[in-house]
Image (cartoon, rainbow, N blue to C red):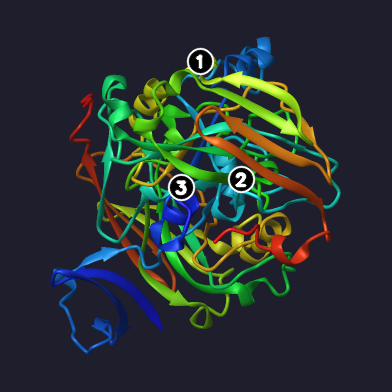
């Protein structure tokens, strides 16, 4: 089953997908174009994994890591399907990252990789923007690059883990204004979903609602205001994002 | 119920963050010395360098911290926690303090480590590694947040004294510079930074942090298995 959280008719609702349409618990069926999509999970701790696809690592001229490069994200970054993400006018390189997002379903501590997928509630699509102009070599990637407002989209749906029998064999692709720019498969992850859960839970306790963004393959390109970026993952759907000019560029309260 | 940050904002529905600030004490940056100009850093930090203390680290005053197996000590991290009241986006330093609701004491614990190159998740994000409390003190009760003395004790012995007067970015400037690139949201807790030469606590030690006007935050450090029930989830709500 697929789950969504939406704003519609003056309230926030949980919804499920029935025959390609949104349906609320009371049976109402809002038209897809009338709803505001929220991230499908009230995310708690949000992890992101850098340099987790061999091809993307080559693209950025890095050596593959020997342990996962993990960083964390704050709630200010999260936004849903069809969100607008601001791009400062002064930057040269802002790019999307299409990522398989893993939603943890229950408390996980010292979980083996064999048992790890039992702790997954489901999967959604992540599009985790970065502005490379702001990279500094302290706690890299630093928050100025990766923790910007409305720059980590999740959605549209949370697809139950039971409906994704092999998360390690899903095609990913990104289209900018309809043109294919990024293509890959989760089979090329350096550290797979089960390994990441094993790794993180070996030194900290994961909880329901935690989200792991598992990294992105090669094919990241600069985006500009007006661009429509669609990130797709097989079996999970299609997550749309709009780049906008930053309305408060240079403004200080 | 005590008026603490954890009671007000610690529940999952609140979706708030605890942000730590790295290298914001003059002593901490000075300890890196000329290394800031060498690989891997290449240049001194420019914008504020932040990290997150996720919810598995949040711990009430008095609750035990468990020293992870295979480690000898934790670095005690006395710091001022600043509770955001009004969301701060691109605020000026002169307007920044209007976005502060109050203050609390935080013991920002980490396994000792020397590199700032990659996020130090394994060192900073252990269960229970962010005691917060005991109380949230309203901003109006603290006349001079830029000149507060902080003290760290181990087993009652004073091991470190520092002051928010030693910050590279004083609080108004820190909030302004962070808010240039991200919003600090209502309920977020911003830690102003840690000085150099943090004292090390070992299993069995009592750790305490005091800040003028905010009280005293005390937590014991236990060996693994010494108190497995209360410590399993770090005591976080």
Residue picked out by circle 3: B17
Q: Between B121 and A64, which is closer to the camera in this rendering?
A: B121
Say which element carries label 1.
Answer: helix
Q: Is residue A50 left or right of residue A83?
A: right
Say which element carries label 2.
Answer: strand
- Tell me, yes or no, if residue B174 can be seen here: yes
A248 in relation to A79, above or below: above
Say which element carries label 3.
Answer: loop
Q: Distance between the residues labelled 2 and 1?
A: 23 Å
Task: Report the mark closest to the observer, 2 or 3.
Answer: 2
Q: In this view, does B54 lie to the left or right of A192?
A: left
Crowding at dot 2, Cα within 10 Å, few <14 / some 14-19 / many 20+, comes out as many
Give the label on residue A148, or none. none
Residue picked out by circle 2: B130
Mark earlier in primary sequence (1, 3)? 3
Residue A117 x/y as whole percent:
63, 73
Residue picked out by circle 1: B165
- Tell me, yes or no, if residue A93 can be seen here: no
Q: Residue at x 59, y 41 (%)?
A: A58
Q: Residue at x 58, y 75 (%)?
A: A166
Chain where mark 3 sits: B
């Amino acid at each position: 089953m697929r789950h969504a959280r939406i704003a519609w008719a003056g309230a926030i609702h949980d919804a499920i997908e029935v025959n390609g349409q949104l349906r609320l618990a009371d049976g109402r069926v809002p038209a897809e174009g009338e709803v505001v999509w929220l991230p499908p999970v009230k995310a708690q701790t949000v992890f992101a994994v850098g340099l987790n696809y061999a091809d993307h690592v080559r693209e950025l001229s890095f050596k593959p890591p020997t342990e996962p490069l993990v960083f964390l994200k704050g709630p200010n970054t999260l936004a849903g399907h069809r969100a607008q993400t601001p791009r400062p006018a002064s930057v040269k390189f802002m790019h999307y990252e299409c990522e398989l997002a893993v939603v943890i379903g229950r408390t996980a501590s010292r979980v083996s990789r064999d048992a790890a997928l039992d702790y997954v509630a489901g999967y959604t699509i992540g599009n985790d923007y970065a502005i490379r102009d702001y990279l500094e070599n302290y706690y890299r990637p630093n928050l100025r690059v990766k923790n910007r407002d409305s720059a980590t989209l999740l959605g549209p749906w949370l697809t139950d883990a039971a409906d994704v029998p092999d998360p390690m064999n899903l095609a990913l692709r990104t289209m900018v204004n309809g043109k294919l720019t990024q293509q890959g498969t989760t089979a090329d992850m350096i550290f797979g979903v089960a390994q990441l859960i094993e790794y993180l839970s070996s030194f900290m306790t994961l909880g329901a609602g935690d989200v792991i963004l598992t990294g992105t393959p090669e094919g990241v390109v600069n985006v500009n205001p007006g661009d429509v970026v669609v990130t797709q993952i097989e079996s999970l759907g299609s997550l749309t994002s709009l780049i906008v000019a930053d309305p408060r560029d240079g403004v200080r309260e | 119920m005590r008026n603490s940050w954890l009671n007000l904002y610690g529940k999952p529905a609140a979706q708030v963050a605890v942000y730590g600030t790295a290298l914001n004490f003059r002593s901490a940056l000075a300890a890196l010395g000329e290394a800031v100009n060498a690989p891997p850093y290449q240049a001194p930090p420019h914008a504020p360098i932040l990290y997150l203390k996720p919810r598995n680290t949040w711990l009430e005053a008095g609750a035990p911290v468990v020293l992870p197996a295979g480690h000898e000590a934790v670095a005690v991290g006395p710091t001022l926690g600043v509770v955001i009241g009004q969301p701060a986006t691109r605020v000026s330093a002169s307007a920044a303090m209007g976005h502060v609701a109050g203050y609390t004491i935080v013991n920002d614990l980490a396994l000792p480590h020397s590199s700032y190159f990659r996020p130090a998740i394994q060192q900073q994000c252990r269960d229970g590694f962010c005691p917060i409390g005991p109380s949230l003190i309203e901003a109006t009760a603290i006349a001079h947040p830029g000149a507060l003395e902080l003290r760290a004790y181990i087993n009652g012995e004073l091991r470190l004294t520092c002051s928010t007067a030693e910050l590279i970015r004083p609080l108004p400037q820190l909030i302004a510079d962070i808010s240039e690139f991200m919003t600090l949201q209502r309920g977020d807790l911003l830690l102003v930074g840690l000085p150099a030469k943090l004292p090390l606590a070992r299993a069995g030690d009592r750790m305490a942090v005091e800040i003028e006007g905010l009280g005293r935050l005390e937590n014991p450090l236990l060996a693994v298995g010494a108190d497995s029930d209360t410590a399993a989830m770090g005591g976080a709500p």
